[in-house]
Amino acid sequence: VQLVESGGGSVQVGGSLRLSCIPSGHIDSSFCMGWFRQAPGKEREGVASIEREGTTTYADSVKGRFTISHDIAKNILYLQMNSLKPEDTAMYYCAKDLCGFTGFTVSRTIQSKVYWGQGTQVTVS
């Protein structure tokens, strides 16, 4: 299983970025897909998730600012991030079938059971 994240970068406070994730295998073969982030010295946490039929869930810290979506035809998962804050600075990862962790940290034990991409860095200053 491979996941390739892209779209990160350095932006000013209040700016926007759109992250993309291309998984091996088809998106609709997964029950859910999600975006996670890890800041230096902090645990990896779930940011947003989307179920196969389109139901979305967001961490309170990003609700109203981030939008998760998927393009089934192109097999791409997106995370549109608006009104970015310095506390959004982190490495962002996508994952397949790691459901129920939006708004929660993901232990190293759980992390080891899931495939991760290389991540894409988001820096807000």
Image (cartoon, rainbow, N blue to C red):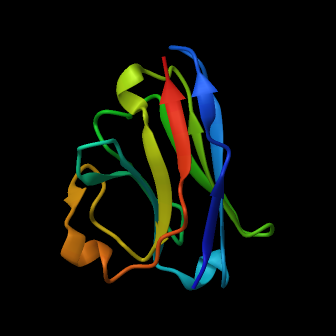
Left or right, 61 with reference to 64: left
Left or right, 92 with reference to 42: right
Q: Is residue 95 above or below residue 17?
A: below
Q: Is residue 94 above or below residue 45?
A: below
Residue shown at the point (21%, 56%) measured from the top left: 105
Q: Report the quarter where the N terminus lies.
A: bottom right
Residue shown at the point (54%, 43%) measured from the top left: 121
Left or right, 55 with reference to 38: right
Q: Position of residue 76 (x, y in %)?
A: 70, 63
Q: Position of residue 83 (x, y in %)?
A: 51, 20
Image quadrant assignment for residue 22: bottom right
**Front residue of this view, candidates 78 and 88:** 88
Residue found farthest to the front: 41
Residue shown at the point (66%, 85%) measured from the top left: 25
Residue found farthest to the right: 74
Q: Position of residue 35 (x, y in %)?
A: 46, 55
How many numbered dots are placed on residues in this image? 0
Q: Position of residue 87 (x, y in %)?
A: 35, 27
Residue shown at the point (60%, 39%) measured from the top left: 80
